Amino acid sequence: MAVEYIELQETRGFSDNGGKKSASRTFHVWDDASPITSPSGVRATFGSSLPDIGDLFPDETVVYAISYSIRFVPESRNIWEVTFNYENTEPGGKLPQEEGYVQITIDYRSEFRDLWRLSPTIPSNGTQNNNDCGGTSIDSAGVPLSVLVRMSDITITETVSAASFPARSLAIRAARGRRNLTVFQGAPIGQVLYQGANASRVGLEKFSITHKFAQDEFSHMLQSPKRNQTGEVIYGPDAQQNQRATVVTLIQPFPGFADFNLLSENF
């Protein structure tokens, strides 16, 4: 088999849109001795006569072939046209609709929260113990101060097989409203809350699942001052004679834990 080919230079294109680079190359390929009769015969030439997926665009260092299209040239002598599409995507990287694709997005944010103490002592893994949380009192006669608290929203999107979806769905249901049992995305045990997921079919045999997590520097614990029978905060003078809430405990609204590694093998 003596495969011949030419690149149509006038079709070679390249663009850079805010750092997103894309390019294309188009070839005509044929074999007079043993005519190519199907796209599989054309694909057999990839990596030898023609480029292949993962090959670099000429004279570039980070622009790789990620896809291709093949078509028969009408009214020709068994000539096939192949167009390779290139992007600045790592070779071997998964595309969004390919099984095993994973994308992680983190939103680093903060919100104001009513606090009676600064720098409280967080119980191990954020487990409620009903003890006074310590720290520095900042309230005024039981009235809290609004303080900025740091947190992160973590979103992980993955593409999985349809066959694995029923088992994944069970794991998602079981993990909702629970905190991380092991270190997760660099966050200590108990700081990350699993909020749930969205799932949609993206192909005959594939699902896209978007998992949502919330990380909180106080392990999602909320300050709760001790109150009297009428619901008023009990306060008294501190060492400087300032009126402060006398007892402040930490409440954990999400006491359960889950191993987030069981949600997916992809993260």
Image: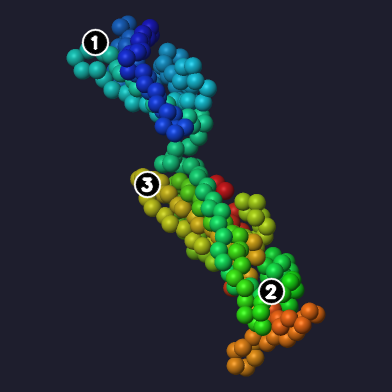
What residue would you read off at disc 1?
77
Residue drawn at (68%, 57%) of the image: 188
Q: Which mark is residue 202?
A: 3
Residue drawn at (52%, 47%) of the image: 104
Q: Which mark is residue 204?
A: none
Q: Quadrant of the N terminus?
A: top left
Q: Which mark is residue 138?
A: 2
Q: Quadrant of residue 82?
A: top left
The mark closer to the camera, 2 or 3, is 2
Q: Residues within 10 Å of mark 3 (few under 14, many from 20)?
A: some
Amino acid type shown at disc 3: Val
Amino acid type shown at disc 2: Ile
Q: Position of residue 219 (x, y in %)?
A: 64, 65
Question: Is residue 30 depicted above or below 83 in this figure?
Answer: above
Q: CA distance from mark 2 to mark 3?
A: 52 Å
Is 160 positioned to the left or the right of 241 in the image? left
Amino acid type shown at disc 1: Arg
